Amino acid sequence: MRASINKACLFFILLDNIFLPIDLGVDFRLNYFVMLGYIIYYFCTHRKIKLTSNEIVFLAAGTAVFIFLTVFFAVSYPLVLKQLLLITITLLFSFLLLNSYNFNIERLFKDYIDFIFLAGLLVVVQVFGVLLKMNFLVDYSYFGIDTGRIDLNAARGRFHAWFYEPSFMAYAFTPVVFISIAKLFNIGNLLSKKKAIFIITMLILTRSSIGLLGVLLSAIIISFSKYPIYRKPIFIVISIATILLSSLAMYKMPAVKMRVNETYQLFSQERVKSEEVAKTNLSTYALYSNFKISQAAIKENIFFGTGLGTYELNYDKYLFKVIPPSNWRDNFKINRQDANSLFLRMFVEMGLLGIIFMVYFIWKNRMRYNEQQSKLKENLWCINNGIFVLIILRLLRQGHYTMLGFLLMVLIFYYSKKLANSAAISHI
């Protein structure tokens, strides 16, 4: 019973595009109710949590620093509290779920892989749905799921299962794609090679630029970890050639080529004109506009930022100052709350202090590959580095703090390194 509840709640992390008609100033998702219900269920049935004294001290110190910075530097207490409430609920849910799994990260990720495999199977169904012109096999909005423009995307050969858009599916798939590529290098045993190839193929069918970048980063990290270049210099030549050829293949895809070219044109000019903004695609405009807004906001609050959850105020303040008139600017507020990039959002809201902490956290908790490690540590390495790639992608192009179980992944990133270290000590 407990295992089934855990798996169901894990699945609802990926099903976060069912919205309820509740107006609380945020998009109220069904999985918020699931999280709150699970928190109540946990304390009624488990009644204990595993938390070390060092972790308690760290939480207390972090809370004290956060309160201090909020009181003296935040520009809006209500927005801070709103964002803090969402993060607290999501983080508590994620931590309790890990507790219920007894911090068995391998078992949790095997369940997660099953759901990713299910999403891949739905992509196959969608492909047949397009071929047979059966829209009910493609668009699942009749279940109350917001699938975005799946009808338009699928017609163009871009599939994303039940997710809102191709990039969202790419974020959900990224840790498992890393594990899949590692399996092809005979690292880890979390899934079979056939399933690994299937999952990688399904991600490619999204034709998501950020997803393809994740595949490339994963392949680079795994190949350089498995075959260190200092041992055999030939790997330098092979690696460089592979990276160049892979990058060229990605660039040749029409959707990727269009975005790369338009992004380069905007960012390479000192003064962008209205016509150039107006003719660019929506994704490139979102990236460019939020970059310019963030740039202006950071200049005024570089060290401590303007407070958690306050990016939207900066958006409203600087949009018309840094972006020339255009249809996009005048009629749409794209990524007004999340900056289209976690890095930009964190820099604006938490300042240089927040960026330094984030970089330290990533550097401190990323696992390094060791050829002599056990199969358990291999699996933990795959999970840890798969989440590392996910963090990089989210820093680049997704600014939502909690969406698609991101905080759960961050916790797993931390605990996978911790478990690997404890396993090494016990082995000694």
Image: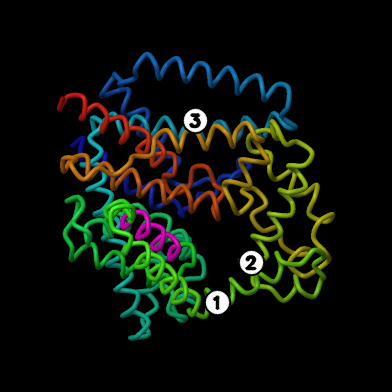
Residue at mark 2 to residue at mark 3: CA–CA distance: 32 Å
Q: In the image, what residue type sits under mark 1?
A: Lys
Q: Main secondary structure of the magenta part?
A: helix
Q: Looking at the picture, does residue 127 appear above or below residue 194?
A: below
Please tell me which residue is depicted at 77% across the width and 42% down the height of the picture.
299
Pick the front one: 152 or 348: 348
The x, y position of residue 412, in whole percent, is 35, 38
In the rendered structure, which segment of residues is drawn in magenta?
211-223
- Which circle's residue, 3 or 1, is located before the other in the chain? 3
Pick the front one: 236 or 50: 236
Please tell me which residue is depicted at 46% across the width and 67% down the height of the picture.
208
Q: Which is more foreground, mark 2 or mark 3?
A: 2
- Give the residue at mark 2: 284
Tell me which corner region of the image, top left, top right, bottom left or bottom right, holds residue 6: top left
The quarter of the image holding the N terminus is: top left
Tell me which corner region of the image, top left, top right, bottom left or bottom right, holds residue 179: bottom left
Tell me which corner region of the image, top left, top right, bottom left or bottom right, holds residue 82: top right
The x, y position of residue 276, in whole percent, is 76, 74
Q: Is residue 317 left or right of residue 71?
A: right
Q: Looking at the picture, does residue 261 appear above or below residue 331?
A: below
The crowding category of the residue bearing disc 2, from other C-alpha atoms within 10 Å (few below 14, some 14 to 19, many at least 20), is: some
- Give the residue at mark 3: 88
Residue at mark 1 to residue at mark 2: CA–CA distance: 12 Å
Q: In the image, what residue type sits under mark 2?
A: Thr
The quarter of the image holding the C terminus is: top left
- Give the residue at mark 1: 257
